[in-house]
């Protein structure tokens, strides 16, 4: 299920973005400050190039590039 980023409370979205950009393997040695990585992820959501995918079975959210999401979920 796709969750519109603008439907989340500001604190919830901020926490989700911080969690995503600070996960192991997401920085690939990049030492860009957390705030800048969060801002980039937020911009991707606002531009529509990234989406929030919620899996009700695992109760987990993921940020994905729109191009990585199965077409059936986008319709």
Image: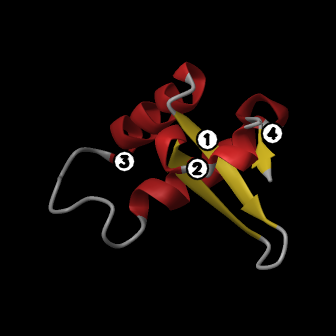
Check disc 2: other Cα within 10 Å, few if <14, some if 14-19, many if 20+: some
Q: CA distance from mark 3 to mark 1?
A: 20 Å
Task: Give the number of the disc on residue 8.
Answer: 4
Q: Position of residue 44 (x, y in %)?
A: 48, 30
Q: Residue 74, which numbered label? A: none
- Identity of the residue drawn at 35% across and 73% down: 24
- The numbered mark, 3 or 1, whose residue comes first in the sequence reads 3
Q: Is residue 32 left or right of residue 60?
A: left
Q: CA distance from mark 4 to mark 3?
A: 20 Å
Q: How many other residues sit within 10 Å of disc 3, few (<14), some (14-19) or many (≥20)?
A: some
Q: Nearer the viewer, mark 2 or mark 4?
A: 2
**In this rendering, is residue 69 above or below 56?**
above
Label 2, secondary structure: give it: loop
Q: Earlier in the sequence, mark 4 or mark 3?
A: 4
Which of labels 3 and 2 is toward the front? Answer: 2
- The reply to whether callout 3 and callout 2 are in contact (CB within 8 Å) is no
**Which quadrant holds the C terminus?**
top right
Residue denoted by label 3: 34
First of labels 1, 2 by sequence position: 1
- Image location (x, y in percent) of residue 43: 48, 26
Residue 39 pos. (x, y %): 44, 32
Nearest to N terminus: mark 3 or mark 2? 3
Q: Please identify the residue farthest to the top as the structure is shown.
A: 47
Nearer the observer, 40 or 3: 3
Give the crowd class for mark 4: few <14, some 14-19, many >=20 residues within 10 Å.
Answer: few
- Residue at the location (75% across, 59% down)? 54
């Amino acid at each position: 299920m796709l969750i519109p980023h603008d439907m989340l409370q500001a604190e919830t979205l901020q926490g989700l973005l911080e969690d995503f950009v600070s996960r192991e393997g997401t920085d690939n040695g990049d030492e860009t400050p957390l705030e800048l990585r969060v801002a980039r992820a937020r911009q991707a959501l606002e531009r529509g190039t990234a989406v929030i995918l919620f899996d009700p079975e695992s109760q987990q959210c993921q940020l994905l590039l729109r191009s990585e999401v199965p077409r059936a979920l986008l319709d």
